[in-house]
Image (cartoon, helix red, strand yellow):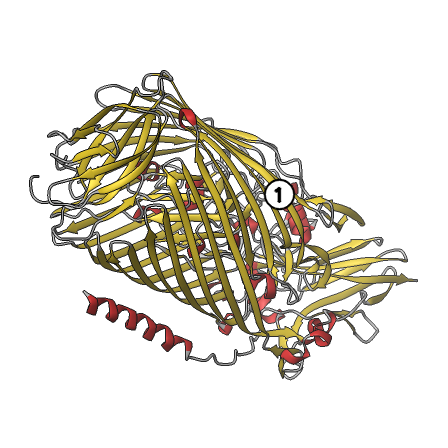
Amino acid sequence: MKTHFYTYQILSIFLFAGFLACTKEDPVLVEEQELITTVALTFSREGAPSETIRWTSDLDQSPLIGLKSNTQYTVSVSFLDESDPGAVENITNEVKKEADEHQIFYEFSGVAIEFEQAPSDVLDSYQNPLYVNTLWSTSNSGSGVVRVYLIHEPIQKTGSARSDFGGETDIAVDFTLQIEN
Amino acid sequence: MHIVRSFFVLFCILSSIQALNAQSCSYRIEGVVTDLHDGDPIFGAVVSIQGTDLFGQTDEEGYFLIKDICEGSILILVTHVECDTISRRVVVQSNTELKFELEHHINELQEIVLLENGITQVNASVQESRLNADQLTLLSNQSLAETLSSLPGVSSLKTGNAIAKPMIHGLYGSRVAIIANGMRLQDQEWGADHAPNIDLNGFESVQVVKGAAALKYGGDASGGMIVLSPQRIRLKDSLYGTSVLNGVDNGKGGSLSSRLTKSFDNGYYISGQIGAKQFGDRKAPDYFLTNTGLKETNFGLTLGRSKILKGWQLNYSRFQNETGILRSAHIGNIQDLLRAIEAEVPIRIDPFGYAIEAPKQQALHQGIQTSYFNHLTAQSLIRLDYNYQINSRKEFDVRRGNRSDRPAIDLTLQTHDFLGSIQWKKGFEWEFEAGMNAFLQDNYSNPETGVKRLVPDYLKYQLGSFITGNFQLTNVFRWEWGLRFDQVHMDVQKFYDTADWIDRRYRLLYSDYEQRDFGTQLLVNPKLNFSNFSAQTGISIGLEDNFKTTFSYILTQRAPNVSELFSDGLHHSLATIEYGNLSLKKETSHKILFGIQKEGNQFTFGFNPYLNAVENFIYILPTGVEQTTRGAFPVWSYEATRVFMWGWDAYATIQFVKRLDYTLNTAYTYAQDVSKDVPLIMVPPFNLYQQLKYSFSGDKMEIQLVHRMTASQNRFPNTNFEVNRIESGSIIQREIDISTPPKGYHTLDFYFSLPLKNQSSLNSTLRFIVQNLTNTTYNDYLNRLRYYASEMGRTFQLQLVLKY
């Protein structure tokens, strides 16, 4: 039985020492894949060049959008991953492709703006608008906020407030609105 | 049974009968001497009292009786033909029953081991609670933590229904050590949402000690230790096993587990165990808990040879599970959290299903263990254990672009653990154990996840040495002490956001750790050292009338764990960003435990108050708000503070009339963050467990009714925060109340046990169990997903236990 004892002791020490000797390789940098760093809103109206306002994650305050009162704008939204300036990724394409699992939505505060789907909007398989391209109709002048939402796996695809959709919020960013005559 | 015997073995104080009168020489000592191998009585052993002419001789039933014993301390001698004499000092203050189990191998050494029902108490000066095989079987459908939560002072910290981790005296995670088969379980114990990867069905008993009473296994478990012991192997030719089959209506699932052991009279044995479990979506009283299914399989194989004096064992175990996490608990931002809290029912309720989708966890835990022990001489024992554990964990989040199939967390944790110890005795009074514990842990965090690592890659080395001793003058006085010293070294490689690294002033403090600059990311290589000292001392004194008191002081020091130091990421279910803290120092806890207990046939009770003062108590608390593209998130960071805790556990069992037993377990914990002068978060509220059990005569039919009461926790810190929401065209500030604990609740469980026709080779029992009998809707403070859904509703369970 003595031999047994030594066998085990030596075996254990050997195993342990074997693993102590191994060194660890440097970890690889994780490529973050679901990052959205930028939300861009492009506004166009008849008789004027289109204008793009960008929200980026390094901003300290919400970017300003200047609009004219009683005017209709075509607004398209895009979501970008600009974490690697050399390889900017347009997430909007992914959202469009998975239209059934996503919903874009806008909520306004302080100003009265109506929005509806634009003729160029993307529809999901149930013909619900994704609101990637929308028509905004401004009324009186004033200032306020628009909150842009990208909702993932909403429980329903129609509604008049964010709470109607359920799901998880992938994006919720604010832009300041200034509507002038 | 007339073969030559020597005397090894088990000596067990069962219970005693109260002293009736104070006349000093009227006491009796009676008991039995049986064979350890097969439980057969031993005939012809002489039990005598030194210095007197009093003696008894065992009859064919192994029974002996000695009368007219005077009060006081006596030395009992047990002799048998051709064997050395064993002596044991006993204090007589009432009629006493003793049980000796002897081993009859020829020419073996004389060794006596003091055991109680085959299980050694972890530490005699610290109260322990225990669940036996029957109690474990009864609850075999549940997780370790839930099973233990019927014990006083033990609660379960849950994340939904299936993920539960044990909490002792309000502490959990790295502060609670789980010891299986004599070695510490290594998994992601640091995470509140990581359940221990262990299946209870492979074990015969569970002991819970509420402090780091067994320094052999580690000096950092200030909460306590959970010791899981496998079945004792019978040392004779036999084949035996147990199978348990459970069918459950809630979740439309069940479990099956089987254990089979073949042992030979030359000491060899082989033992195998398999288990499988599956559930679909569970149901709260009013709705299905979507995506709360569970799949689990486990397997174990043990080979060994045990010969009382020496033995070896080789063991392999595998545990795999996949656990769904309530779908509605996966949220995107704090407005989603507010909406979830406001909603009466979970936001997403789908019809029942077995499918487990993201969010979910997958864990695979494998372990190989080899152990060896040898009684080198009559007075000494050497024990060697080596254990390799590999634990892989994958967590899946709901992700965009078909990435839900790709884990968001993918960790592989490998641990090599070696424990060697030597025990020796000096006379009958002193017993010592000294040893060494070496440990290497390697964590690998797979970068393929495409998500920032929650915990970094690291190597952790630990070298510990310990010495413990106990001094037992008589059976009524015992003094125990222990010292342990650990050196911990961590070699970590972590990527920090360069901006964060600078913001948190790490560039100033730890520029030495910086390894490589990747622009926005910085690879750092902290090398941390901690020296921990732990100590324990305690006494146990037997008093009159079967009263016993214990007193113990335990000093523990714990190095911060990897999550406290380095955690870095978004917690989807709580919508919080969690940050570790590189500057943390070791945590030191001083715990004083006091106990008084009384054993008896009709009445047993115990009261165990404790104090725990912790310096540098590491905890997580809200420290600010961070702006992300998902909106503003509250940031929680690990910090250290001073904590003062006190509390008590109490239990009582009363036999009202014959066959009708009442059990009461109750516990209270007070915990205060002294530096900030606020209560500590996630402390179990006052709770009470009552059980009424009636056993029918004859056929051993049994009915049990269990009532649990959990009070509302009135002591909690305010961690609420504000969120702004656009409501009908204007921005409204709303407070998110994540602090207020839910109301207290009562639940009732019902158990009915029916022994079926029993033959000598097959023993079967059928049980019918109802949990949450009244289908009460309630939420539990210690469930981290309490904001999203209620606890499970009424659950019917049918259980068949076969013993063969």
What chain letter is assigned to the residue under label 1?
Answer: B
Residue B547 against residue B484 in the figure, above or below: above
Residue pictured at 60% horizontal, 57% vertical? B587
Of residue B79 and residue B662, the one placed in the foreground of this image is: B79
Name the element at disc 1.
strand
Asked whether B788 or B237 is in front, the reply is B237
Task: Specify whether B238 is left or right of B623.
Answer: left
- Residue B778: name its quadrant: top right
* Image quarter of residue B656: top left
Position of the N terminus of chain B by quadrant: top left
Q: Which amino acid does label 1 sit on?
A: Met
**Is residue B87 positioned above or below B20 on the image?**
below
Estimate the x, y position of residue A82 in percent, counting from the top left: 67, 76
- The image shows residue B488 at horizontal and vertical percentages of 52, 67
Residue A126 image point, x, y percent: 55, 55
Q: Which of B586 and B318 is in front in this view?
A: B586
Q: Which residue is at the far front?
A: B51
Figure disc tally: 1
Q: At x 35% / y 25%, what residue is drawn?
A: B71
Q: Mark 1 points at which residue?
A: B645
Residue at 20 percent of width and 49 percent of height: B260
Label 1 packing within 10 angstroms: few (<14), some (14-19), many (20+): many
Q: Quadrant of residue B143?
A: top left
Q: In the picture provided, is B792 more to the left or to the right than B247?
A: right
B592 in relation to B434, above or below: above
Residue B119 shows in the view: yes
